[in-house]
Each structure stands twice: as structure tokens, then as C-alpha cells.
Amino acid sequence: MGFQFQSLASAAAGLTKDLGLSQADLGTLIGLYFLPGVLLALPGGALGRRYGDRRIVMVGLFLMITGGIAASIATAFIPLAVARTLAGIGGVLLNVLMSKMVIDWFAGRKDLSMAMAIFVNSFPVGVGLAIAILGPLASSTGWHSALAATSGLAAAALVLIAFGYRPHSNDRAAQAATMAGISTREAMLVCIAGTMWGIFNGGFSVMFSFAPPMLAQGGIAPVTSGLIGAAATWLLVASVILGGFLAQRGLSPTILIMLGSVVWAGCLGTIALGNTLSAPALLLAGSAMGLPVGVIMSLPAQALRPESRALGMGIFYTWLYIGHGLIPPIAGHLQDAFANPVAPLYFAAVLTFSMLPLYWVFRAGLLRTTA
């Protein structure tokens, strides 16, 4: 999913040239991949309960294959938008239901946190592979082949799920998830947590989509910029694991949130300067931004009762897709409106910094609930 999501940004130069796309168009297409999740995160879980998790994940992978092929042969913005949306619908089904599949297999075990960290890390791993592979592929053979390559990877995943995965006994287990099962206070708290996760993922998308041009202003070649971006994503992967380890060792969640949000925001501002510090700042951002991931992912469990977790997690993932779907297009429109390539990065810096006060609001609400 991460590989397919990043493919558009990796092939952006050829797409803007051949199809005449503006930066706003590009930002919209990037966001369209996750925008369907705003409407489908909750129904996706219901489909899994009715037809089986693995079956719906396979449907999602088929849609990703179809969307990738359709995107590779698109000749204008509208067909590309339709293809991107189709692939995004498949990605939503994949993401929501595979989260449940991992929880089914690891619930009640001490390695659940590590399992979820690996699952979450799979997205930046895919993004890093796309930056390292699809950018050079698009430069050498054209953007068509870069977008088509995502279908090949989705097809391989479909084969693995079909023949290599053993469904858990909870697959297709009936679960009640009604509005009566969650209180207003729980819904508000999980919305705050979901907003933080949406900001994290939207800021991630903006940084890796709009930072490379700023590296070029610092005199870095496009190929080198791609390698630096890939290195930053691998540092992010490591920082997610490090943040989980530090939290388990007793480091304050507030410190982890502060390190992630404040350092990341400062790095985005530095990247926007477009000088020789941009590349080190991108690497530092990758090293710091993953530290609070484990804390953020644990917030819904702190706010929700066992009987309200099904609906509560649906709400949490809805905010994830709002952030993924809306923040990149807004960033693209800001760049066009101000005619300035730094606008998206400053916008993302403000958002990422806001995760810290949002966490304080969450903690205050949680303490008020338990008082």
C-alpha cells in the first residue's frame, strides 16, 4: 500500500509534463488514495464480518491491481483520478481489515505492541522502496511503467494472502458495533487521538511529496534526493521501534510526543529554507518523527472500554483517512495560491507541532473521565 501510494509522487515530474497537471492537481491525486477511507473505514469492518477478513482483503488487493493498471494508461486528470480512487478503495479495505487480522493473532500476547509496530512500519517501508525504485524507473522508462509496477507488487501480495495466510478463528466472528456502545466522552477522546494520527500521516505525505524540490535548491541532484528520502523513511522505521522500546522502558509519553512533534516541525521549517541544511534536516526528521507513533496508537485503548473498541477504532481510522485525504491537497493549493514551494512545508510544520497540545487536551480529558 505504501509502495502504491508513493508511486504518484515518484513519477510526478513525468506526469506534470505529459498530462499538464498543476501542483494542486498533484496534491489532489496524492490525497485521493486515502480519501475513500473517510467513508469506508467503518463499512469496511462490517464487510469483513459478513464475508470474511481474508476474502475482503483479497478484493482490496484486486482493486489495487486494477487501479494501478488504469493509472498507468491514463491520459488526463479525470481518468487518473478515477484510477487513483479505485486503488485507494482497495487500500482502505486492506488497511482496516489487516489491522484486525494482526490483532486477532496477537491479542493477549506480550508481543502485540511489536506486531503492531511491524504492521505500521510496513507503510514507510513501502514508501521508501517506491522512492528508491520508482523515481529512477520513471526517469529511465517513463511514468507509465512506474505506476504499472505497483500492480505487480499488489498481485504478489494477493498470491501470498490467498495461499500463505491462515485465517484466525475470529475471522467472520459476529461483533456488535452500534452507537449505543460508545459514550460521547469516549467518542471525543478517540477523535482527538485520531486527529493526531491523521496529522502524523498527512504531514508524512506532505514532507515526502514536497521536500525533494527543496533539496534540489540546496544543490542536490534528483537521484541523490531520492536516496536521501529513502534513507529518511528507513530512519522513520527505526524510530518507530525505538519509540516503542523507550515507552516500554518507562520514558514519559509526553517527552516522546514532544520530541516527535517539535523536532519534526523544526526540521520541516529548516527543509523549507532550501539550503545545505535541508538534507540533514530531512534525515533528522525521519529519526524523530516516529518516536511518538507507539504512544499515539495506544491512545484509543486508554480511552475506550472493551465493548466500545470496535466502533471507536472505526472512528480512529476515519480521522486517519481525513488527514491522509485532505492535508496533501490543501498543501498543494497553498503552494499554488502563494506561488511558493515552501508553503506546504510550513503548513505541515504548524500541523505537526499541534500534535503536542492535542495530546495535552487528550490527557486532560482522560483524567477528567477517570476522576
Image (spheres, grey):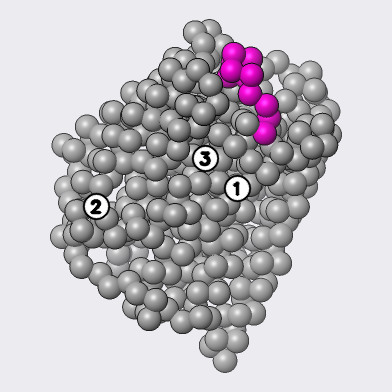
- Work out how far the residue at label 2 is from the one at label 1, CA to CA, in angstroms: 28 Å
85 or 181, which is in the foreground? 85
Amino acid at dot 3: Leu
342 relative to 67 in the view: left or right: right
Disc 2 is placed on an element classified as helix
- Work out how far the residue at label 3 is from the one at label 1, CA to CA, in angstroms: 8 Å
Q: Which residue is at 32% across, 50% downward?
A: 98
* Residue 84 visible here: yes
368 relative to 123 in the view: left or right: right
Residue carrying label 1: 326
Say whether disc 3 or disc 1 marks the residue closer to the N-terminus: 3
- In the rendered image, the vertical position of residue 367 relative to residue 76, given as above or below: below
Q: Position of residue 214 (x, y in %)?
A: 76, 28
On-image quarter of the N terminus: top left
Q: Which residues are magenta?
A: 14-24
On-image quarter of the C terminus: bottom right
